[in-house]
Image (spheres, rainbow, N blue to C red):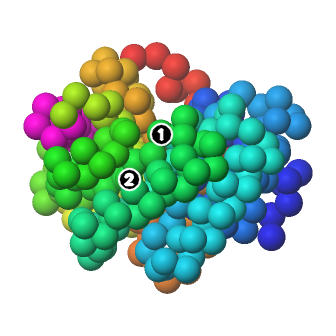
């Protein structure tokens, strides 16, 4: 299990390029470790937490228990939201089941005196319905263009994700905040016609940062470091990081400072 000092060292690196982190689960003390590391080292980050649903109700309940324990131990000042699941409808869960999980988590937080934390789910934009939006405090969507069946240029790839987010905002969200839960570009592998190279990862990051700001969208950029731990995953899934697996920057982050 990763210790708090290791987490602190990693988060200090993340804080050089970000001000928020998104966690997908609360198990194995990951939320507690992150909160303790941030507080003990005065790291300029806040946390958007997660409850993992894919492994079933027992794991979900364990995640929720650890979330509540971490929030009560470390306080809620750094916790800015809680995503119940990630792309679970896309992975076969019924919408009704997901909405019930959201309600269950919200009721538990209210019972524990933690009702000030926004509760929502995260889903691919094509699967985010008005019913999911109604059940969520925030409409958090994962949107990628690198999986598209066509490629023109990096500008068009960035504008594609912005247009899709605007479609959710205008037709699904019902006036609620729309936030990117994920967007990014892999530096290796093959998903079709989109060229997955480090140069294009840099270009997407630069252009997306500027386009999201211009369009008024909050976002989480996927992801902090390369995920070589995903044994057996395709190469593209392992190479989304802006840091490599050793937490060394893959490019000069000052390139992101201007539009």
**Where is residue 82 shown, x and y percent of the image?**
51, 48
Left/right placement of residue 29 relative to residue 171 reads right
**Where is residue 244 shown, x and y percent of the image?**
62, 54
**Where is residue 235 shown, x and y percent of the image?**
44, 70
* Residue at 72%, 68% in the rendered image: 28
Mark 2 element type = strand
Q: Are marks 1 and 2 in contact (CB under 8 Å)?
A: no
- Residue 73 bears which disc, if any? none
> What's the distance in space between the residues labelled 1 and 2, CA to CA?
10 Å
* Residue at 20%, 58% in the rendered image: 127
**Where is residue 128 shown, x and y percent of the image?**
22, 52
Q: Residues within 10 Å of mark 2 (few under 14, many from 20)?
A: many
Left/right placement of residue 30 relative to residue 22 reads right
Range of residues picked out in magenta: 157-173
| Quarter the C terminus occupies | top left
User: Foreground residue, 224 or 196?
Assistant: 224
User: Foreground residue, 9 or 85?
Assistant: 85
Report the magenta stretch's main SS: helix
Residue 121 visible, this angle: yes
């Amino acid at each position: 299990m990763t210790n708090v000092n290791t987490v602190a060292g990693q988060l200090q690196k993340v804080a050089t390029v970000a001000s928020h982190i998104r966690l997908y689960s609360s198990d194995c003390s990951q939320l507690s470790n992150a909160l303790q590391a941030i507080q003990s080292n005065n790291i300029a980050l806040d946390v958007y937490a997660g409850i993992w649903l894919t492994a079933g109700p027992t794991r979900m309940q364990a995640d929720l228990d650890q979330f509540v324990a971490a929030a009560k131990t470390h306080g809620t000042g750094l916790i800015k939201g809680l995503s119940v699941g990630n792309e679970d409808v896309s992975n076969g869960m019924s919408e009704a089941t997901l909405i019930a999980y959201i309600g269950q988590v919200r009721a538990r937080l209210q019972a524990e005196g933690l009702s000030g934390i926004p509760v929502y789910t995260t889903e691919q934009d094509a699967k985010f319905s008005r019913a999911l939006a109604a059940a969520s405090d925030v409409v958090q969507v994962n949107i990628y263009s690198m999986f598209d069946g066509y490629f023109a240029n990096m500008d068009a790839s960035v504008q594609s994700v912005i247009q899709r987010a605007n479609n959710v905002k205008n037709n699904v969200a019902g006036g609620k905040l729309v936030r990117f839960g994920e967007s990014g570009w892999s530096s290796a592998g093959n998903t079709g016609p989109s060229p997955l190279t480090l140069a294009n990862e840099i270009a997407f990051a630069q252009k997306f940062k500027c386009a999201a700001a211009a369009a008024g969208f909050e976002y989480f950029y996927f992801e902090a470091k390369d995920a070589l731990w995903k044994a057996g995953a395709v190469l593209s899934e392992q190479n989304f990081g802006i840091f490599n697996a050793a937490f060394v920057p893959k490019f000069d982050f000052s390139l992101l400072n201007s539009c």
